[in-house]
Amino acid sequence: MRRCRAIAAPAAAAIAALALAGCGRTEAPEAAAPPPRVSVVALVPADVTVADVLSGRVAAVRTAEIRPQVGGIVRRRLFEQGAEIRQGAALFQIDPAPFQADADMARAALQRAEAVAAQARLQAGRLEPLVQAQAVSRQAYDDAVSLRDQALAEVAQARATLARRELDLRFATVTAPIAGRVEQALVTEGALVASTDASPMARIQQIDQVYVDVRQPASALEALRTAAAAGTPPPRPGRAGGEGLAVQILGTGGRAGQGGGTAPAALEGRVLFSGISVDAGTGDVLVRILVDNPRRQLLPGLFVQARVPRATYSGALSVPQQAVVRAGGRASLWVVDDAQRAHAVPVALGEMVQGSYRIAEGVQAGQRVVVEGTERLSEGLVVEAREVPAPGVAAQGASASASASMATAWSPAQAALAADR
């Protein structure tokens, strides 16, 4: 026991000395936290065109149903099914023999009538000097003149009959009334056709230009008229010209309401008119668009999407959707000043175009808006700002004179609902 106590006493003294030395030291101050890093974009004014993407159906500019104008047996089909044909091209050959015989008979009747007319003309010519010399009665001369006139009338009738028979002979060759693409033949060689048939022999559709019929809510009709009155750039060479609002055709699809694929090349058209009546069931109006279709990409009956401009803003300011902060039902942006301090600025939002909001009011061009790192900010906090290019700035810089590309627009309420989801 004595030995243990002798060992413990020096150890306790050493521990006490260390404790006193530790109490005499001062704690080192903690290092200051670095400023949060954020990404900012500089607001650059640009022209923004707000548009609606509407689904529509393609229709041919002109459609002709080929029907016979005379009856008979089809002898030959003179076209390739699905080929492009010119106006006046021969399509079917109906047996011309009966019509050729009728024409020959009418020609013979005309020759007979002309011979009778010549004889009557000579007889009236002989009696004319005799009646003046009172060698024959006036009655005989009047009868000769009447026969002459009747003979001339029969000549005119025979000539008209011959023209009709020759016309029937020409109708035996069925020709194309318009230029376009002919569909499959609906009759074959040996079929008996008549001018009263209910079904056509074939169909031709002109599709070098097509109509795209889309439906738009009647509430948006006034905005469409305003955009059309504001004017659009002149059409490019070879494009659908004339008056009307410029429209872009986006893609094609097999069913209504489905996007399908993207058209191989951009197609442009112009709005021709808007329907004057509103569909009582849907509240929509019909908008017809004329589109150039040189490569025959759009086929009648196909569903497509058309981008129809609704409004154009010159020098508008836009920010990415993630930059908008919502609190208490109001929208605001975080802006970094020259002293690298962050400030919350309330803004009024416009439409959302291609993932960016148009700012109606609240900020100015040149200000730097935080697009990443807003969750770490507080009013007046010093930040380390890293500037990133704004969406679409590179594309707009490549063509400064061109207007900004059109895009589907969402209202702020629709965009907020989508963000909440």
Image (cartoon, helix red, strand yellow):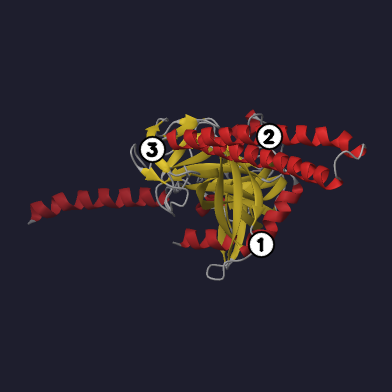
* Label 1 crowd (10 A; few <14 / some 14-19 / many >=20): few
Viewer-side residue, 366 vs 260: 260
Q: Quadrant of the N terminus?
A: bottom left
SS at circle 1: loop
Q: Which residue is mark 3?
A: 74
Image quadrant where residue 177 sits: top right
Q: How many marks?
A: 3
Q: Position of residue 363 (x, y in %)?
A: 70, 51
Query: In this picture, is 243 found above or below 83?
Result: below
Q: Which residue is mark 2?
A: 402
Give yes or no for contact between labels 2 and 3 (Cβ–Cβ under 8 Å): no
Q: Position of residue 373 (x, y in %)?
A: 51, 48
Rounded to the nearest whole Å, what is the CA distance between mark 2 and mark 1?
34 Å
Residue placed furthest toward the bottom: 280
Viewer-side residue, 165 vs 20: 165
Q: In the figure, is residue 362 to the left or right of 95?
A: right
Q: Which residue is mark 1?
A: 276
Image quadrant where residue 163 sits: top right
Point 53% across, 67% down: residue: 282
Q: Position of residue 13 (x, y in %)?
A: 26, 51
SS at circle 3: strand
Residue placed furthest toward the left: 1
Amino acid at the residue labelled 3: Val
Point 83% across, 36% down: residue: 127
Q: Position of residue 69 (x, y in %)?
A: 50, 44
Query: In this picture, is 292 found above or below 16?
Result: above
Rounded to the nearest whole Å, what is the CA distance between mark 1 and mark 3?
45 Å
Amino acid at the residue labelled 1: Ile
